[in-house]
Amino acid sequence: MLDAHTYHTFHILNTIGGIPQISEWAAFHHERLDGNGYPFHHTAKNLTLGSRIMAVTDVFGALTEDRPYHKAMPCEKVMSIISKLAGSNGLDADVVKVLEQNYDDIYEITLNARRQYIIEQQKLLKNITAPAVHLFNN
């Protein structure tokens, strides 16, 4: 089921219309240049720069965030893993180079976005009351 989220993303966003690039970028974030990604197994020739950026961004986010299956990793380890993926033709080496050159700024922006997300989530949860239960008589 986890692998299917990119496939469903592609089809759901395509129903909106007018955003084909965005639906492609969102749906192809697990594709790899060597064709070993999913769900469509596209190779480099079928992946736009936006899709390549999303792929690097997705790995970056997965490695720098606490996840149920691992703690956030330090910069050196994150860049080591991402660089290996670029070296094995999984991720775009030019995009990885830009990440490496701007790592501190990108990481800071990411942290600020995560903090803002938590604040917004807390506001939303504060405004939610107990679910209303409606009983209907036949």
Image (cartoon, rainbow, N blue to C red):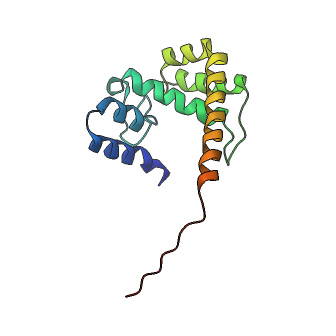
Pick whichever, 126 or 30, lies toward us: 126
**Percent position of residue 23, x then y:** 35, 36
Pick whichever, 74 or 106, lies toward us: 106
**Percent position of residue 47, x then y:** 36, 26
Q: Is residue 37 above or below residue 44?
A: below
**Percent position of residue 10, x then y:** 35, 42
Residue 138 is drawn in which quadrant? bottom left
**Percent position of residue 104, x then y:** 67, 17
Q: Residue furthest top?
A: 101
Exactly how many numbered labels are in the figure? 0
In the figure, is residue 103 to the left or right of 2?
right
For image coordinates 66% across by 29% down, the residue present is 111
For image coordinates 64% across by 17% down, the residue present is 105
Q: Is residue 7 above or below residue 128?
A: above
In the figure, is residue 29 to the left or right of 47?
right
Residue 76 is drawn in which quadrant? top right
For image coordinates 57% across by 18% down, the residue present is 99
In the figure, is residue 4 to the left or right of 21?
right
Residue 85 is drawn in which quadrant? top right
For image coordinates 61% across by 14% down, the residue present is 102
